[in-house]
Amino acid sequence: MKYKQLVMDFGRSVMKRVRSSPEDLVPPRRRSRLRHDPLLEDFANQLLKAVGCRSLQARVFWNPSLRTTAGLAVWSDRMVVLNPKLVEVSSVEVQRTLRHELAHLLAKHRAGRHRIEAHGDEWRQACADLGIPNEARCHELPFKRRRFARKFFYACPECSTILSRVKPLRKKAACIRCCRKHNGGQYNERFRFRPIGRPDKIAA
Ligand SMILES: [Zn+2]
Ligand SMILES: [Zn+2]
């Protein structure tokens, strides 16, 4: 009876650990993409030690499935997850985001059972201690989604369909709608897009 209980408890604790594993944060097919970074992790824990926090051990991972989120902190796993796109921005940005997320863990750790605001006074203090005073609360990457201004416009001489492009057309391009309608889908000079100025409104 006692043994059975012990096995059950053990099973439960294993399940608990499995459930709270970092892999749970990402969809199953992308689980393997979560990358542990022992070097950054070591650095993060040295930072914590330097501010007198020895009882908190942080784990550091990269998650390529993050889109515009620069990073996040998962308190239940004492874990910082970073977006690999940060590397393309700069190493300074990696450092800053690591400290920003680490500050979340540090603030939570210091607060103990007290509930704290995500970006409240405790977090700001932790940021200052970790060397990033006046840190912004924003988690979004500075580059967000790239949006190129469309600068080149063309029109079909037949149906006036407008084509907008980021780069100029290099090859001859004709209006597919008119080519299909009037020419059996074959290219015809008659329907070739002609450059025009910036129209007032662009449909798409
Ligand atoms: Zn934050
Ligand atoms: Zn056309």
Image: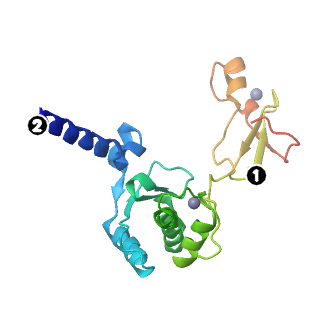
Residue 13 vs residue 40, the one in the foreground = 13
Q: Nearer the viewer, mark 2 or mark 1?
A: 2
Q: Give me the disc on residue 3.
A: 2
Q: Give me the disc on residue 180.
A: none
Residue type, mark 1 in image: Lys
Residue 96 vs residue 110, the one in the foreground = 110
For residue 28, which quarter of the picture?
top left
Residue in the image at 42% along x and 45% along y: 25
Does the residue at mark 2 contact the one at mark 1 (Cβ under 8 Å)?
Answer: no
Going by the picture, which residue comes out furthest to the front?
Answer: 2
Give coordinates of residue 56: x percent, y percent: 38, 67
**Secondary structure of residue under mark 1:** loop
- In three-dimensional space, the C-alpha distance between marks 2 and 1, rounded to whole angstroms, equals 74 Å
Residue 25 vs residue 177, the one in the foreground = 25
User: Quick one: quadrant of the N terminus?
Assistant: top left
In the picture, measured across the screen, residue 131 lies left or right of residue 53, that is right
Give coordinates of residue 14: x percent, y percent: 24, 43
Going by the picture, which residue comes out furthest to the bottom?
Answer: 50
**Secondary structure of residue under mark 2:** helix
Q: Residues within 10 Å of mark 2 (few under 14, many from 20)?
A: few
| Mark 1, residue position | 151
Quadrant observed for ligand 1 in the rendered image? bottom right
Residue in the image at 51% along x and 64% along y: 111
For residue 188, which quarter of the picture?
top right
Classify 40 as above or below 164.
below
In the picture, measured across the screen, residue 190 lies left or right of residue 93, that is right
Residue type, mark 2 in image: Tyr
Residue in the image at 40% along x and 71% along y: 44
